[in-house]
Amino acid sequence: MMHTTYNVSLVVLSVIIAIAGSYTALDLSSRTRETEGWPRQAFVGAAALCMGGSIWAMHFVGMLAFGMPGMQVRYDLALTLASFAVPIAVTAISFFAVSKRGITPRTLGLGGLFMGLGIGAMHYIGMAAMVVDAELSYATGWVVLSFIIAISAATVALWLSGRGTSLSGQALSAAAMGVAISGMHYVAMIGAHFTPLDDAMSATHGGDLDMLSLAVAISAATFIVLFFGLVASMYDRRQARRSWQGNPP
């Protein structure tokens, strides 16, 4: 089994992405309780995009933080794109289901299970996208635990998406969700074991710079999307307040 390392700065960045994505998704979903028609569906979709997209960004930055000294790591583009699509799709379906049917034990149970399994699948599809001269195997117990964490975090996310909360409460909820989501990733990584192949190729120094640049680019793109999501939510909230002041009940 190979010795593995982590870039601590990128690990911290991945957790920050998960927290920021959770906060933005909760903020956007809060607007669905005060809008109707297509604006409501737009906010649900935006919340799902921010949630699913940030989950993937957290995962991929976390993968870029991962290293195996002396081993070159690359990523298959098709599988990487698939891992990007999965969390957005399952998050959108689950958020729309909760928005349409309301928060019920059945909706939360099925939605949380579906979304959590999708998040877990995203992680392992992303792992399959790794092109490395080593054999990858998993410890069953850690795999099961990672899915339990993913399903639990997804269920809580759906529950919080339908509840009103104060700004401080929203921030605390986002921090808890972000830590749980990123925790799922790193728990899953504990259970991943790499055994080098006989004809393994040594890594080149240039790859590290490329990986770092890619991590920065993905993080920047994610934060830009989240920023515009928050701006949209703040604008809609301000317009609603002005409308209420002009036409009080």
Image: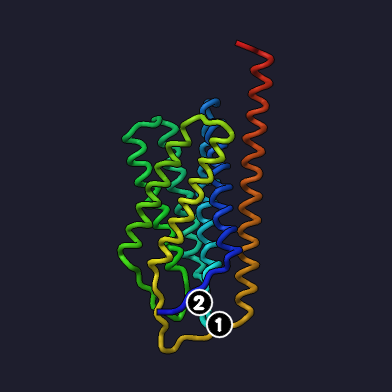
Q: Which of the two residues, 15 or 154, is positioned nearer the viewer here?
A: 15
Q: In this image, 188 relative to 218: left or right?
A: left
Nearer the observer, disc 1 or disc 2? 2
Residue position marked by numbered label 2 in the rendering: 68
Question: Residue 218, relative to residue 174: is it above or below?
Answer: below
Distance (Cα) linking label 1 and label 2: 9 Å
Residue position marked by numbered label 1 in the rendering: 203
In the rendered image, residue 60, in percent from the top left (x then y), is placed at 53, 62
In the rendered image, residue 48, in percent from the top left (x then y), is placed at 50, 43
Task: Judge the density around disc 2: few (<14), some (14-19), many (≥20) Cα neighbours within 10 Å.
Answer: some
Q: Amino acid at mark 1?
A: Ala
Element assignment for label 1: loop
Q: Which of the two residues, 102 or 151, is positioned nearer the viewer here?
A: 151
Element assignment for label 2: loop
User: Pointers 1 and 2 in contact (CB under 8 A)?
Assistant: yes
In the rendered image, residue 93, in percent from the top left (x then y), is placed at 43, 42
Residue at left 67%, top 27%? 238
The number of numbered discs placed on residues in the rendered structure image is 2
